[in-house]
Image: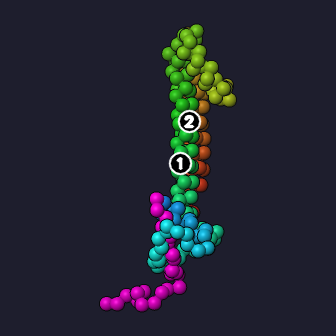
Amino acid sequence: MMNDQQGKPRFDQRRVEVIVHPGSTRSDEVNREFERSGPLFSGEQTGTFDRMAQPSSEGAPTGARREASLRRRFTIGKLIDGWWYLIAVLEVFLAARFFFELTGANRAAGFVRFVYGLSEPFAWPFNAIFAVPRHAQYVFDPNVVIAMVVYALVGAGVARLLAMLIEPPSSV
């Protein structure tokens, strides 16, 4: 059985000349082919093939746009990974603060002072939301737990907003 597409070219096909430079990559070849309109240089091999034309708003080749899109997705993905790392470090310091207060850790100890000093600016906005029950040196501070929950939710929201930059639009 004969395929209808073999006999005549469709309107969305075009003939593309591919120029191959020794030692170059495929994307370099495609970029050069679209940028150059002059005669061929020495040392190049040429060949032609039929390829499906992709509509392009900028005139850039489909491969170059795809590569730029992949690079953008990779960059934003790494940004999301870094964001989650920062949120995790913050959560660890807040959890350590909560644990040290709960167990009555010695505030004069160097590491405890370090953890309190680093986590204080992040716990401060949540101070005095609830009363802090104390039993001798043991303190249960629900405000630190609220800070941990809020920072985790804000972190998830920012990560989701960044992820929306690389997702294709959904059809509704």
- Where is residue 119? Give x, y as percent: 61, 24
- Helix, strand or loop at label 2? It is helix
In the image, farthest residue toward the left: 1
Q: Is residue 167 above or below residue 120?
A: below
What segment is highlighted magenta in the picture?
1-23
Q: Is residue 80 left or right of residue 45?
A: right
The numbered disc on residue 105 is: none
> Magenta span has 9?
yes
The numbered disc on residue 77 is: 1
- Helix, strand or loop at label 1? It is helix
> Foreground: 115 or 63?
63
In this figure, which colouring scheme has been used for the structure? rainbow
Q: Is residue 90 above or below residue 134?
A: below
The type of residue carrying mark 2 is Ile
Say which quadrant the N terminus sits in: bottom left
- Residues under labels 1 and 2: Cα distance? 15 Å
Residue pointed to by mark 2: 87
> Magenta span has 38?
no
Q: Is residue 160 above or below residue 68?
A: above
- Where is residue 77? Give x, y as percent: 53, 48
Q: Is residue 44 left or right of residue 123?
A: left
The type of residue carrying mark 1 is Gly
